[in-house]
Image (cartoon, rainbow, N blue to C red):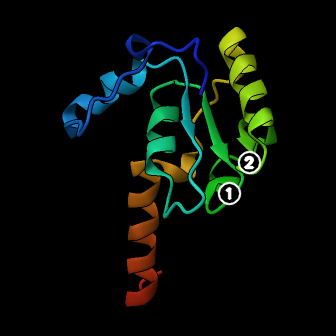
Amino acid sequence: WSSDVCSSDLLLPGLIADDDLPAFYAGAALFVSPSRLEGFGYPAAEATACGVPVLVSDESVYPELIPDERLRFSTKDPAVLADRILSVLAAPHLYVRPIDPRFTEAYGKIRYEQIIREVAGAD
């Protein structure tokens, strides 16, 4: 924790309503998730969908969700995370990426319908 950081630099919003999440994400300069155990990675996917640069740990589901190594970091090396945060904030346009189509609602619906056809034997 740096003594240069003021409490006015931090935002601790508490629970955010689902309807407000897109605006909340879109207003962010960067989304960072140092999670070591993430079930799916919804927050990172949501931030990506809102056009926000994302940095995530290289653990759990994140390597599959965010394959670009520039956007991942080891939770064991805070210096790398600090360096990546500064790099993204200096040139965010270089780190915004389109969301992987496998993580969109439309893809999920198409895949779900395909599985139903296969199970029903109507493929």
Count the numbered circles shown: 2
Label 1 secondary element: helix
Of the pair 89 and 98, the residue shown nearer to us = 89
Identify residue for label 1.
Answer: 64
- Tell me the number on the disc at residue 43: none
Mark 2 to mark 1: distance in Å?
6 Å
Indicate left or right for 4 with 16 as reference: right
Q: Position of residue 52 (x, y in %)?
A: 53, 24
Q: Residues within 10 Å of mark 2 (few under 14, many from 20)?
A: few
Of the pair 97 and 40, the residue shown nearer to us = 40
User: Residue flagged by tag 1: what amino acid is it?
Assistant: Glu
116 shown above or below 97: below
Would you identify the image quadrant in which residue 93 lies? top right
Q: Position of residue 36 (x, y in %)?
A: 60, 58
Identify residue for label 2.
Answer: 67
Look at the image and tell me in which quarter the N terminus lies. top right
Of the pair 59 and 82, the residue shown nearer to us = 82
Q: Position of residue 116 (x, y in %)?
A: 38, 79
Residue shown at 47%/54% (left/top)? Answer: 107
Residue shown at 71%/9% (left/top)? Answer: 90
Q: Position of residue 77 (x, y in %)?
A: 79, 44
User: Residue flagged by tag 2: what amino acid is it?
Assistant: Pro
Indicate left or right for 114 with 33 as reference: left
Residue shown at 51%/42% (left/top)? Answer: 44
Label 2 secondary element: loop
Would you identify the image quadrant in which residue 10 lies? top left
Indicate left or right for 71 with 6 as reference: right
Residue shown at 51%/24% (left/top)? Answer: 51
Query: Do the residues under discs 2 and 1 have CB atoms within 8 angstroms?
Result: yes
91 shown above or below 23: above
